[in-house]
Every structure is written in structure tokens, then in C-alpha cells.
Image (spheres, rainbow, N blue to C red):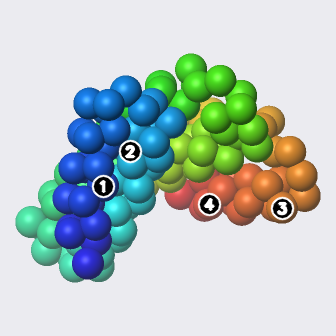
Amino acid sequence: RPDLALSSATAAKALYQKVGNKAEESHMLYAASQCALTLADKASESQQPEAQRQARKHLTAALKAAKEGLAIARKLPEEADPQRALLSNLLTVVAQAHGALGKSKESLRFANEVMRLSADRKSECSANILLAQVHNW
């Protein structure tokens, strides 16, 4: 249940913030943003106006959480995220949320940053898939 997962991630984020663990706080913001994307996806299955408003609300929440996590992740020392996976994951959510909200230029900007961070073939493939999604919106 993504709504319960979102509540749990939000509670964990608050605890990590309280104890000053920035890396885990950023991870929980990523988890919350993923949950919000899932909720948006489920809401968008209906064409009812209220469901579409809910989808947009969840997309906006995903974008907010991912951007907050991204701001923290950019300041983390390299040993806290040596492969830059957390940073790439947060950038991916930001790109996806912008794309789903119809902000294609912003989406493309973040997707290109994911591509620049690609450290190996697997991450490069993921970045290319993200770029394909962005160009499809």
C-alpha cells in the first residue's frame, strides 16, 4: 500500500532529520517521492476530474520530496554515496515528475544530468531509458 509506505517514509525522514543523519534523510525523501509517483500513477488511471487533481497533487508532492532530497544529496560527501546512485535516483524522480506535469524542458535538463552521472553501462542504459520517457511526454 503506497499510502502507508509514504507515511512510513515520511515518519522515518523526520526521525533521521532529528538525529542529523543527512544521507538517510535523503534516502527517505527518495522513498517518499517514489510512493507519491505510485499514488499519482494509480490516480491517473481514472479520467474523472477529481482523480486527475489527485494525480497532479501526488506528482507535485513527489517533485517536492525529490528536490528536497536532491538538495541534501548534492551536499553529501562522496563516501556517503560513492556511486552517486542516490543522486541519480533523485534526479530521475525529478525528471519523471516534471515530465508527467508537462514541464518537458525541466524534465530534459534533469534527465541529461542523470546521463552525465552515468558511471557504467547499466547506469547509462537507465539514463537512456529515462531520456526516452522524457522525449515521449
Q: CA distance from mark 2 to mark 1?
A: 7 Å
Residue 126, x across and y down, in percent: 74, 60
Label number found at residue 9: 1
Crowding at mark 4 (Cα within 10 Å: few <14, some 14-19, many 20+): some
Q: Amino acid at mark 4?
A: Gln
Q: Secondary structure at mark 1?
A: helix
Which one is earlier in the sequence, the residue at label 4 or at label 2?
2
Label number found at residue 85: none
Label number found at residue 133: 4
Q: Amino acid at mark 2?
A: Leu
Task: Write down the residue under mark 3.
Answer: 122
Which one is earlier in the sequence, the residue at label 2 or at label 1?
1
Q: Secondary structure at mark 2?
A: helix
Crowding at mark 2 (Cα within 10 Å: few <14, some 14-19, many 20+): many
State whether residue 14 appears in this view: yes
Q: CA distance from mark 1 to mark 3?
A: 27 Å
| Mark 3 touches mark 2? (CB < 8 Å) | no
Q: Amino acid at mark 3?
A: Lys
18 is higher (above) or lower (below) than 41? above
State whether residue 40 appears in this view: no
Q: Secondary structure at mark 4?
A: helix
Q: CA distance from mark 4 to mark 1?
A: 26 Å
Crowding at mark 3 (Cα within 10 Å: few <14, some 14-19, many 20+): few
Residue that appears at 34% across and 38% down: 16
Q: CA distance from mark 3 to mark 2?
A: 24 Å
Which of the 4 image quadrants contains residue 36?
Answer: bottom left
| Mark 2 touches mark 1? (CB < 8 Å) | yes
Q: Amino acid at mark 1?
A: Ala
Q: Secondary structure at mark 3?
A: helix
